[in-house]
């Protein structure tokens, strides 16, 4: 298989060479423990602090507000559980949406068992949180709202600023606002101050950084109960010897993502538009799930399309034969047989649920790749339909 | 004093003239299973096999209990034919197993080595008395003892009491070769295992239908072979790329016959592979009535296409029995991984449950069957799994 066309960048991305280089040199030379007293320790600590600075700059916050974690899942858990437990005396009501990533949804399910009361608000057919529902759900008991920035399956962008405004205007009490920005960071500009965000999650491997590293922004003044007890690293919030190579790699990847953001956006939007236009024009029986391309609520890099009469899984494998890597709904759930909660939430029928394919781009992708993919899709969709439909 | 495993085999003992062949096969299977264990020595005489090996005793035991043809395994002590050593050995063995407390016992001696000064009853009496004196909590019962301490005096003496049940059956390799139609499901690995138990060496064939089933389904089958290979020695797995054949069937035959026609094609291809590999039969995991393609009518229609015997060890088993066996064999956890094996996409909505042979053949009439078989045979990968 000579060709390799990777359109599964929402699952994970290829690590950039520049990032690998800094990781390798950290492993080789800067191998100290940041907590050690000697020079090797100080060097490692410095490297960690430089990364913290880079990420803080990217989010327009202070570097003391950045905390490293093992990735997006841990950051989401820390944010949600940490805030819920810390502020439970103010109230036990929490709000999230019903299209969140499993690391958020399942954390809320866990908290329900712990005696918290959770409202899961609906989204409209484009996968955008229904603001009126949010308004209705806020009570004096509400202590935390968690809404994702960009949905990983359909690419809908949530109105984060509007949500933040509503949260602060609807309640006398301070409600903590957490944003899972795993699919948003490096894709759309983020300014946590202007956007009114209190907690924000990012994950390295979604923007060409390494796996196993992520970060949580915690607005100064907000306290969380840590999940992990130990040597008090990360100011006691995340114990465990720092993953220095990972942190350095995360910093490098973040730097490149932010400096390349404009270029990324224009490039992948073009790919997305090109792909969706060709598919709509040339393949019958398709449906775009989520916001369409020119919608301002549509993320530049993700598009979800249903091919009627075909199981997404089979189409993924069929395309794999040509070296084209796609995904059904989300990678996290692709091994489970149950269908996507996100597509259900936006009202997809069974047939559309089954036939859904997610294309997610990176700046490494090209128009030629998209064209090749569409050609192969045309052939395979036709072939598969002729076999399956009887 | 040294530790050995005394291995007994029952069924082989009944085999008359072929017995040496059966025994040799069993010894060579044991040798292969333990080949990486240091200090391995295997002796065979008088209907017993003695295995001596250094290393982790439990590991050796775990491997021996997975060899077909072994009736029981007794961890034994081998000593000089000296009464004091025998007494000491008997105590060591009993003490290693704390459960002796409150139990009854009896000593039984055999003495093929007639140069030993005491008679068998005398040995039993002396050793019995020694045990009784040395270990509290044991009582003698000569009629129905909980623990039977065996002493065998040959050139050396052997002391043992524990009997770990083996798998029984016949040593793999004494009954020729068969080709197992292996899917990722629960049944077929069990069917293969049961055939192996009768001494049949197994190769496997898997029909892969990528992209309709994923490569993970294929990996699952390889993993199943890996478990079966523990009982069999390396398994040769033939992976047939069946997608093109399936596409033709799907396009050109009535949907309600699809499953049965698919099975007929699989059997035809399998038979050709079997003949090439000198396998004398095909093994399937079919069980009557489990699904539409396993009714008596369907079985009859499937059977028709193969000339060599089709072995169906599970034919009268129900699902629970099969699952229980799969658990014991160690294939269950692999079989239930959620990757579809024979793609559900192709299961017709209304399969014929009682197809007449005439109808099945009519449904197949316009197909160029020979050509399709050749097509399937063109795309076979062979994987050796050990």
Image: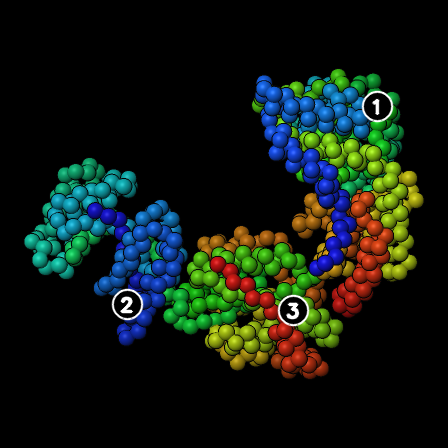
Q: Position of residue A18 (x, y in %)?
A: 73, 38
Q: Element at badge 3?
A: loop
Label 1 – label 3 distance at C-alpha: 59 Å
Q: Is residue A126 visible?
A: no
Could you tell whether B246 is left or right of B162 in the image? Answer: right
Contact (CB < 8 A) between labels 1 and 2?
no
Q: Residues within 10 Å of mark 3 (few under 14, many from 20)?
A: many
Could you tell whether A188 is left or right of B75 in the image? Answer: right
On residue A193, which mark appears? 1
On residue B242, which mark appears? 3
Please give the chain letter of the residue carrying mark 1: A
Please give the chain letter of the residue carrying mark 2: B
Q: Is residue B277 above or below residue A146?
A: below
Could you tell whether B112 is left or right of A290 in the image? Answer: left
First in sequence: mark 3 vs mark 2: 2
Q: Position of residue A167 (x, y in %)?
A: 84, 25
Residue on which disc 2 sits: B13
Q: What residue is shown at x 68% (from left), y 31% (from top)?
A: A247
Circle count: 3
Of circles 3 and 2, the one toward us is 3
Label 3 – label 2 distance at C-alpha: 45 Å
Q: What residue is shown at x 86% (from left), y 52% (from top)?
A: A367
């Amino acid at each position: 298989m000579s060709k390799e066309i990777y359109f599964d960048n929402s699952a994970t991305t290829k690590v950039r060479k520049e990032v690998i280089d800094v990781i390798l040199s950290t492993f080789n030379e800067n191998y100290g423990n940041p907590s050690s007293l000697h020079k090797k320790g100080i060097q490692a600590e410095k490297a960690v602090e430089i990364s913290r600075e880079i990420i803080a700059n990217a989010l327009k916050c202070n570097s003391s507000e950045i905390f490293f974690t093992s990735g997006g899942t841990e950051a989401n858990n820390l944010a949600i559980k940490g805030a819920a437990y810390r502020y439970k005396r103010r109230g036990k009501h929490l709000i999230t949406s019903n299209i969140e990533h499993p690391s958020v949804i399942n954390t809320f399910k866990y908290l329900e068992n712990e005696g918290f009361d959770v409202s899961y608000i609906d989204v409209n057919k484009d996968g955008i949180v229904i603001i009126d529902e949010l308004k209705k759900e806020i009570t004096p008991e509400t202590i935390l709202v968690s809404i994702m920035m960009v949905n990983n399956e359909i690419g809908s962008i949530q109105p984060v600023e509007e949500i933040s405004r509503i949260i602060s205007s609807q309640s006398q009490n301070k409600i903590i606002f957490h944003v899972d920005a795993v699919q948003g960071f490096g894709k759309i500009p983020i300014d946590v101050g202007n956007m009114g965000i209190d907690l924000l999650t990012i994950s390295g491997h979604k923007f060409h950084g390494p796996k196993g590293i992520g970060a949580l922004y915690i607005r100064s003044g907000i306290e969380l109960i840590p999940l992990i007890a130990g040597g008090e690293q990360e100011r006691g919030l995340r114990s465990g010897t720092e993953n220095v190579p990972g942190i350095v790699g995360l910093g490098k990847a973040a730097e490149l993502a932010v400096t390349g953001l404009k270029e990324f956006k224009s490039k992948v939007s073009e790919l997305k538009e090109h792909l969706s236009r060709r598919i709509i024009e040339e393949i019958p029986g398709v449906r775009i799930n989520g916001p369409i391309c020119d919608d301002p609520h549509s993320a530049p890099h993700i598009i979800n399309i249903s091919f009627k009469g075909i199981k997404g899984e089979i189409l993924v494998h069929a395309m794999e034969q040509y070296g084209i890597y796609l995904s059904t709904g989300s990678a996290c759930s692709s091994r489970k047989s149950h269908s996507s909660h996100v597509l259900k939430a936006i009202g997809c029928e069974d047939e559309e649920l089954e036939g859904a394919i997610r294309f997610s781009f990176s700046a490494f992708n090209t128009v030629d790749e998209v064209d090749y993919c569409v050609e192969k899709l045309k052939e395979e969709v036709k072939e598969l339909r002729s076999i399956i439909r009887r | 004093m040294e530790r050995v495993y005394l291995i007994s085999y029952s069924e082989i003992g009944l085999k008359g003239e072929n017995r040496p062949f059966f025994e040799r096969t069993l010894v060579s299977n044991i040798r292969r299973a333990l080949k990486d264990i240091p200090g391995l020595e295997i002796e065979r005489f008088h209907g017993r096999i003695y295995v001596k090996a250094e290393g982790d005793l439990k590991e050796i035991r775990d491997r021996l209990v997975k060899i077909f043809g072994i009736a029981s395994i007794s961890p034994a002590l081998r000593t000089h034919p000296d009464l004091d050593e025998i007494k000491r050995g008997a105590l060591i063995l009993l003490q290693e197993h704390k459960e002796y407390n409150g139990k009854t016992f009896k000593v039984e001696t055999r003495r093929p080595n007639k140069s030993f000064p005491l008679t068998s009853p005398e040995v039993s009496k002396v050793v019995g008395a020694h045990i009784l004196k040395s270990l509290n909590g044991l009582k003698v019962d000569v009629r129905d003892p909980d623990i039977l301490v065996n002493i065998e005096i040959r050139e050396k003496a052997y002391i043992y009491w524990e009997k770990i049940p083996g798998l029984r059956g016949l040593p793999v390799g004494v009954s020729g070769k068969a080709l197992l139609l292996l899917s990722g499901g629960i049944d077929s690995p069990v069917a293969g295992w049961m055939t192996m138990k009768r001494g049949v060496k197994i190769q496997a064939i898997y029909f892969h239908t990528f992209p309709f089933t994923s490569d993970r389904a294929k990996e699952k089958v390889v993993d199943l072979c890996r478990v079966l290979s523990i009982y069999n020695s390396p398994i040769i797995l033939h992976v047939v790329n069946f997608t093109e054949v399936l596409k033709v069937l799907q396009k050109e035959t009535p949907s309600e016959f699809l499953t049965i026609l698919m099975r007929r094609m699989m059997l035809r291809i399998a038979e050709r592979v079997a003949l090439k590999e000198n396998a004398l039969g095909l093994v399937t995991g079919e069980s009557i009535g489990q699904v539409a393609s396993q009714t008596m009518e369907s079985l009859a229609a499937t059977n028709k296409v193969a000339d060599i015997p089709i072995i169906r060890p599970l034919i009268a088993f129900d699902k629970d029995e099969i699952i229980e066996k799969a658990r014991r064999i160690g294939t269950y956890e692999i079989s239930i991984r959620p990757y579809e094996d024979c793609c559900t996409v192709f299961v017709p909505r209304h399969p014929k449950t009682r197809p007449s042979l005439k109808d099945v053949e009519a449904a197949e009439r316009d197909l160029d069957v020979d050509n399709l078989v050749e097509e399937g045979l063109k795309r076979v990968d062979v994987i050796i799994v050990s």
